[in-house]
Image: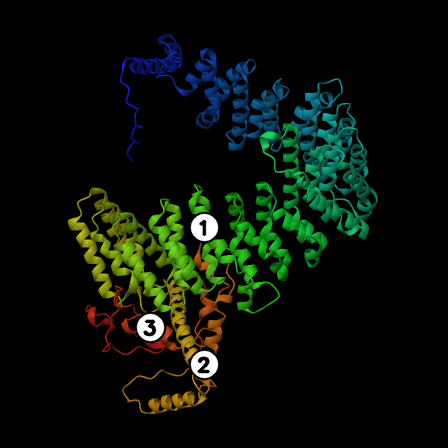
Amino acid sequence: MHPPPPAAGVAMDFGQNSLFGYMEDLQELTIIERPVRRSLKTPEEIERLTVDEDLSDIERAVYLLSAGQDIQGTSVIANLPVLMRQNPTETLRRVLPKVREVLHVASVEMQLTAAVSFLTILQEESVPVHTYAHSFLQVILLHLEHRDTGVSNAWLETLLSVIEVLPKETLRHEILNPLVSKAQLSQTIQSRLVSCKILGKLTNKFDINTIKREILPLVKSLCQDVEYEVRSCMCRQLETIAQGIGAELTKSVVLPELIELSRDEGSSVRLAAFETLVNLLDIFDTDDRSQTILPLVKSFCEKSFKADESILISLSFYLGKLCHGLYGTFTPDQHLRFLEFYKKLCTLGLQQENGHNESQIPPQILEQEKKYTSVRKNCAYNLPAMIVFVDPKNFHMELYSTFFCLCHDPEVPVRYTIAICFYEVSKLLNSGVYLIHKELITLLQDESLEVLDALIDHLPEILELMSTGGESSVQENKLTSLPDLIPALTAAEQRAAASLKWRTHEKLLQKYACLPQVISSDQIYYRFLQRMLTIMMTNNVLPVQKAASRTLCIFLRYNRKQDQRHEVIQKLIEQLGQGRSYWNRLRFLDTCEFIIEIFSKSFFCKYFFLPAIELTHDPVANVRMKLCYLLPKVKSTLKIPADKHLLQQLEMCVRKLLCQEKDKDVLAIVKRTVLELDRMEMSMDAFQKKFYEKDLLDQEKEREELLLVEMEQLEKEKQQNDGRSPNDKIFEKKRRDTKTQSLPKGLPVSVPVPGPSSNTPSTSKEIKKSKLIRSQSFNNQGFHAKYGNLEKCVKKSLFSSKSSPAAYVPSVSGLPKTSAISLPDDSFRPRNASSVPPSFSPNSQLPSTSRGTGSTDTKSGGSKDAPPRKATLKSRKSNP
């Protein structure tokens, strides 16, 4: 870009005044730099900070703790776990005493560092437990009541972790006995607060008799403390104590204390009692819930609107758990009251929306609106629990309007939370999932990418439920029930691509791999597939490009039209593999790697083998280097002897790289790759025990690819037959019968499948009919929840690409026992030039690799003079 020309009539001023102005600016910059220069250390300071390099680690630590500055002492304490690992004896003998001395007058930063280091030493088990207790426990206990709250809490967290591993006798003498005096009213508030948390941790370490005799009296005393902070803290520990003492003692000791605390004058104490009661609902029996807890909870909810908003925040968070825990104790009237209370919380604060600018609203009103937003966010979090509360069958009448309001809430945190819960809501509704179709579109079109990011975590599962759920069982009807899905998905991708949040864009492209199981192949081809190719060529983020490449390969895998597949393959080879940009050629190699993973070996060898190894002549070293890393996977797609000519071409390319490569980095990788290629064992045409599972998986992929072509042909035949008159159909049948009777003897004829019905003339019709039915229901198959691995993705789909050996053991007829459709014996033929169906052969523009029968002449691989294909699995095994 060129700088804009000066305005007319305005000249550039290089006079004296202008120069003086520039000098003043330079002086200001000099003044700005002065404080930085002043902050540098003087020679004297550097000399004081310098330590003799000949000192050992232990000696240096002792010296710095004795004569060094605070920052040096802090560094030594932070390095204490390393010293304990290297030399625990000397560290305990010489360094730890110095640490104790320093901590008496240490700064806050050094205290926090020491607490973390002590905890790290415990977790790493650098010393035995009894040694740790003898050396470190007293230091921890000494600093529990530090005047700084942050330091005190840090040491307390360390102590609570230490309590988990200390033996009972040590706990009794070192912690429990001193705790009796620390919990008295004469001690400071901080001391009593620490005692509350320690008591909660100690309950699970002693037997019932010790708890009754020594711990529970302290608990009751602290529950009746004069300070509300202590009562609230002790109340929150009652949950842990109840879990340690069992249901009987909880009912006789803990429940009365909770009832009394729930009526406390302090709001924070009542809130703590409410939360503890909700968390302990599973411990109490039905009578306690209905006669004792329910009245308390009901009274608390009624008074909550008159109290502080912070109580509403907590109440809204625990409301779902409360309704679930008290479900069997509600009367119909109480059930309705709690439901209405939840609905009221879901719209709290929305009535006050006035559309004013935030700068015009008083700060106290803004703070109140933030609290109301937190309440509605918690309500969105509890929506699945409330659906269970009202029964999913009543969702439309009771909670749909509330769900609608939460999806259209003006605040992003609320919509973000409802997007996270959307999948759970969909599962609960089951056949009623059609009720929330519009809300799915709304959240996909949300202006906030945070909402979109939360929604797409379970987008494949949601779309599967949308496509298979609902009242109708016909695929076409289900697809038409989401008319706005495709525009919403494309708009969401474009919005993510235009933002700087590339991780959201990458995740969205990965989740789009589920679309073949939701929408038709033509819709994917015209609305998504070209977009994936554009992203691969134009996007600047590598993970996004790889995600688009993998998703494009999956789209290609499930595309049902041969001409569309060939067009995509041609674009991949011409625009990526033969592209002008080396970046595009690198992405082509990434795509080849995905092709090897997703498609059959024959598919890769037919379309991508030669374009891939041609990149050994690429002028850019990075492309050749990446190809070298890919060569072992490329070789793994070959089978001997059918692919002998391809193996020779691969070896020729590798030899050229070894002889002609000038880049030293590429040459080093080539040498390592050659060694790896030599160690590889080649797969044979016949099944081998070593590669049995892989061969079965690859055979299944080949069969699926063949079935795609056959289904397309069957659909075309059906369309042609539907358009003919009955007389034309009869004439065509007679013509086929006459042609079959006049076949020459030397022409191979397909062998009928043995079976009781093989002699009936209607067998071929039944086979075609079953295939056609299967083709019509192709897109109606379920898709697995995890799309990171395609072999796991399609377990539920028609084309299951991962199978156990037992699932595909050939039966007497040569077909898989689990197959629901009759397949021709072509699927068991050897992968030679004639084994590839003519409909799968590429167009003239596509570079293809024909598989011969062991000959190196590639020209005759696809000719009509090729040897006839073998018809059975047995003949394939006999092939050398």
Residue position marked by numbered label 3 in the rendering: 839
Which residue sits at x=38%, y=77%? 825
Q: Is residue 625 left or right of residue 487?
A: left
Please determine whether, in this image, residue 710 is positioned above or below residue 18. Answer: below
Q: Secondary structure at mark 1?
A: helix
Which residue sits at x=46%, y=13%? 69
- Horizontal and vertical percent position of residue 703: 39, 70
Splitting the image into 4 quarters, where does residue 434 fall?
bottom right
Front-most of 617 and 192? 617
Please determine whether, in this image, residue 133 is positioned above or below residue 258. Answer: above
Q: Residues within 10 Å of mark 2 (few under 14, many from 20)?
A: few
Is residue 140 in view from this perspective?
Answer: no
* Amino acid type, residue under disc 1 in the picture: Glu
- Label 2, label 1: how many angstroms apart (C-alpha)? 40 Å
Q: Secondary structure at mark 3?
A: helix
Front-most of 627 and 673? 627
* Amino acid type, residue under disc 2 in the picture: Asp
Q: Which mark is residue 115?
A: none
- Label 3, label 2: how many angstroms apart (C-alpha)? 22 Å
The furthest residue to the right: 291
Q: Is residue 511 left or right of residue 415?
A: left
Q: Secondary structure at mark 2?
A: helix
- Horizontal and vertical percent position of residue 455: 54, 49
- Label 3, label 1: how many angstroms apart (C-alpha)? 34 Å
Mark count: 3
Is residue 297 in view from this perspective?
Answer: yes
Residue position marked by numbered label 2 in the rendering: 722
- Horizontal and vertical percent position of residue 775: 46, 72
Residue position marked by numbered label 1 in the rendering: 493
Q: Quadrant of the N terminus?
A: top left
